[in-house]
Amino acid sequence: MTQEVNTMNQPIRAETMKTGKYLTFSLEKEEYGISILKVKEIIGMMPIVSVPQSPAFIKGVVNLRGKVIPIMDLRAKFEMPSIPPTERTCIIVVEIDSTASTTMLIGIVVDAVSEVLNIKEEEIEPPPEFGTRLKHDYILGMAKRDGRVMILLNIDKILSSDEVVEIEQTSNNQL
C-alpha cells in the first residue's frame, strides 16, 4: 500500500516542484525562468575559447577560477538569430544533471538577466502541446504574472544525453 501512495503522489510532487524562486532572463523579446537552485553564479561576458568540432550552439569554453566551463549560446540552441553582445549580455552558470549520478557546470549566454521572482503554483500553467514532432520537454510550464508570460525551463532537459556526453568530452579535452 505504501508503494501505491508514493506512486500516486509523484505527479503531485512534480507539479509542486515547479513553484519557487526563478532567475528570469530575456532572449529576443521573450522572458524565461530557471530555478534559482540550479544557478551557481552570473558573470559578465568574457573571452570564450572556441572548440573545433563542437555543436553549433556551443560557443566554446571559459576558464572560471581554474575550472573549464563549456558555454552554450541559448539563442543558437533555440534557433534564434544571432546578435552581437551588449553591455547587458551575460553568462548564467548553471548546474545540470549530466549522468545518473553526476552533475556538470555549464554557462548559458543570455541577452539580459532580469530579476529573481517567487512564482506560485497558481501562476503556472502546463506548457502548450505542440504535437509529437516537436520535443519541448525542457519547458516546465508557462508562468503568468503582471500580464506577461514567462517560459519556465527545466535546464536539465535543455540538452539531450548525447549532447551532454559530447560537451563533457569537449570540456575534458581542453583541460
Image (spheres, rainbow, N blue to C red):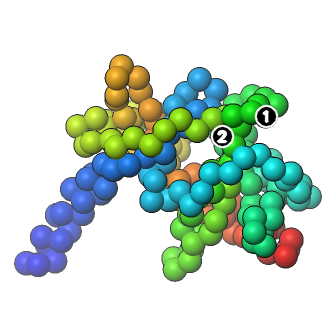
Amino acid, disc 2: Val
User: Which residue in the structure is indicated by mark 2?
Assistant: 110
Between residues 42 and 11, which one lies in front from this camera angle? 42
Q: Residue furthest left?
A: 1
Between residues 123 and 79, which one lies in front from this camera angle? 123
Q: Where 167 falls versus 136 (above or below)?
A: below
User: Which residue in the structure is indicated by mark 1?
Assistant: 85
Image coordinates of residue 47 in percent, x first then y, are: 86, 51
Task: Answer yes or no: is residue 169 visible.
Answer: no
Number of residues whose C-alpha sits closer than 10 Å to that of mark 2, classed few (under 14), some (14–19) or many (20 or more): many
Residue at the image point whose x is 33% and y is 50% from the top: 20
Label 1 secondary element = loop
Label number found at residue 128: none
Label 2 secondary element = strand
Residue at the image point whose x is 62% and y is 51% from the top: 42
Residue at the image point whose x is 36% and y is 19% from the top: 147
Image coordinates of residue 122 in percent, x first then y, are: 23, 37
Amino acid, disc 1: Pro
Q: Where 44 falls versus 89 (above or below)?
A: below
For marks 2 and 1, the one nearer the N-term is 1
- Rendered image quadrant of residue 80: top right
Image coordinates of residue 61 in percent, x first then y, are: 81, 60
